[in-house]
Image: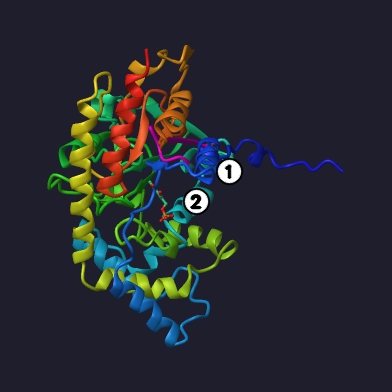
Amino acid sequence: MELKFSDRINRTAMSLTMQIAQRAIELRAEGEDIVDFSVGEPDFPTPENIKNAAIKALERNLTKYTVNTGIVELRKAIADKLERDNGLFYSADEIIVSNGAKQCVYNAIQATVAEDDDVLIPAPYYVSYPEMVKLAGGNPVFINTSIESGFKLTPELLESSLTPKTKMLILCNPSNPTGSVFHENELGALKDVLRMGNYLILTDEIYEKIIFDNIHFESVASLGDEIKKRTIVVNGHSKAYSMTGWRIGYAAADRNIINAMSKVQSHSTSNASTISQYAALEALTGPQDSVEIMRREFERRRDFLYKELNSIEGIKTTKPEGAFYIFPDVLNYIGKKFNGKAINDIFEFSFFLLNVARVVVVPGIAFGNQNCIRISFSTSMERLEEGIKRIKNALEMLV
Ligand SMILES: Cc1ncc(COP(=O)(O)O)c(C=O)c1O
């Protein structure tokens, strides 16, 4: 019998970066020293107080199912956080705790996007958004942003992309992969267009705590009650508290939206890990100094990388204001030759860096961009220095 997969699955792509990751694994197995700039998680251990809270939960036998949307203490702590940090008022029943921010985005899309609905996604985008939209039967519609506007969505671009079919706009702020952050005045400028129509706004704020240059973070949901009602705020513990493996994310939105998301979750995974929920409660209510220590270290690395990359002829890059990625444009090197063989696109360029410099980067095409590579600075300063040195040497071999 020939197994037939659903149209939804056939429309969904596997990760484009798998081939590069696979080659890196092979090279490592051969004993090669590979510098990995493709990492998507903080390189710090989870803070001690959070780990101890999990141990305590185990000792107290808090190891059973919880209510589907998460323990009420955690949802209240999330509501307090949203009020304290973002000036947003939500009650505990307007919040859902999920297995990572990723599941929140997935739940939100499954709950609201119908067959053939359009979902606007500014590009470059986080890899999973378009595939999640396709899994729900919707159409991802890309809005290409440019390096000149710092890869930020502008009111003009948004207005010209809106149609009666627009069901949702997905914003990633701060952005993976570009590190861009909307300043208050830029969000203010978007406000009028965000109020046009009745579409939902999903704002993924998972990198909120990793922001540089003293920029004040503002959530899209704080742009007024009318916008807040249509907005789903997604955040989580993975990046701020270095808790990627604990799988805790959360969403806040209108009660009806949260109820619909809860239905999706109740029939798929049920509650997020109970032990992780108690650890997440400690993360939000305990000391916050480790968050600032990590943030400062990311900023130091950002400064180093920005300076180094800018000193390489033919590379241009925006200065990331958040997250732990830099997204340099290397278009000048596409078409150049290595050992007589042309590098034809960004994918081949990334392969060249792996094969010659022994550095893993993610080609921009994975995020809907043909000209850039994503370099993660979630790795030690020593490795960043080594990687940059290798990249410089490799680029000098291109003619
Ligand atoms: C923009 C963005 N959203 C969501 C996630 C997923 O986070 P979580 O670990 O909370 O599922 C990531 C992880 O890389 C991300 O970069």
Q: Percent x, y for residue 25?
A: 52, 44
71 inside magenta stretch: no
Write the residue at 55% across / 43% down.
Answer: 114
Instruction: Confirm whether residue 264 shows in the render.
Output: yes
The residue singled out by tag 1 in the image is 135
Write the residue at 53% across / 50% down.
Answer: 110
Whether 83 is drawn above or below 162: the answer is: below
Q: Which residues are magenta?
A: 117-127
The C terminus is located in which quarter? Answer: top left
The quarter holding residue 317 reads: top left
Whether 93 is drawn above or below 396: the answer is: below
| Identity of the residue furthest to the bottom in this view | 60
Looking at the image, which is closer to me, 23 or 377? 23
Look at the numbered disc 2 and give the secondary structure of its residue.
helix
Write the residue at 35% across / 78% down.
Answer: 53
Instruction: Confirm whether residue 211 shows in the render.
Output: no
119 inside magenta stretch: yes
Write the residue at 41% across / 82% down.
Answer: 57
The residue singled out by tag 2 in the image is 106
Crowd rating for badge 1 (residues with CA inside 10 Å; few <14, some 14–19, many 20+):
many
Q: Amino acid at mark 1?
A: Leu
Distance of label 1 from label 2 (alpha carbons): 9 Å
- Asked whether, in this view, residue 281 is left or right of residue 96, the answer is left
Q: Do residues under tags 1 and 2 come within 8 Å of each other at their CB atoms?
A: yes
Q: Percent x, y for residue 322?
A: 24, 44
- Asked whether, in this view, residue 74 is left or right of residue 343, the answer is left
Q: Percent x, y for residue 184?
A: 17, 42
